[in-house]
Amino acid sequence: MAKKQRGALAWGIILIVIGLIFILDNFGVDVWDSLARLWPLALIVWGAWKLYFGLKERKEEAPAPKPEQD
């Protein structure tokens, strides 16, 4: 996945989550209390996302191993 597409995907997810927060708040669900307790989970997911795609990108850019000569 190209960097531009990943960025668009990430922003799309962020906008959906923010929209869900506001709509649930409008329906009387106390979302802010849950967010206050679970916000570190966003950091964990973000870090895992960056780690996964960073390792994947490094693997794709790595040169092919040279065959051993006997």
Image (tube, helix red, strand yellow):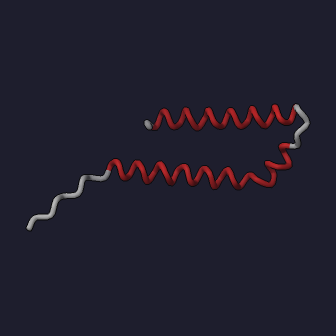
Task: Decide if residue 47 is on the left or right side of residue 63.
Answer: right
Q: What residue lies at 80% left-to-right and 55% top-to-bottom?
A: 37
Q: On the rendered image, what quadrant is the N terminus found in? A: top left
- Name the spot of residue 22 as percent of width and height, x first: 81, 33
Residue placed furthest toward the front: 70
Task: Decide if residue 49 is on the left or right side of residue 41.
Answer: left
Residue placed furthest toward the right: 28
- Name the spot of residue 45 as percent of width and height, x first: 62, 51
- Name the spot of residue 39 as percent of width and height, x first: 74, 52
Count the numbered circles shown. Answer: 0
Task: Decide if residue 41 is on the left or right side of residue 5.
Answer: right
- Name the spot of residue 23 as percent of width and height, x first: 81, 31
Q: What residue lies at 58% left-to-right and 38% top-to-bottom?
A: 10
On screen, residue 13 above or below 55: above
Residue placed furthest toward the left: 70
Task: Decide if residue 33 is on the left or right side of residue 62.
Answer: right
Q: What residue lies at 55% left-to-right and 32% top-to-bottom?
A: 8
Residue placed furthest toward the bottom: 70
Of residues 70 and 61, the one drawn nearer to the viewer in this rendering: 70
Q: On the rendered image, what quadrant is the C terminus found in? A: bottom left
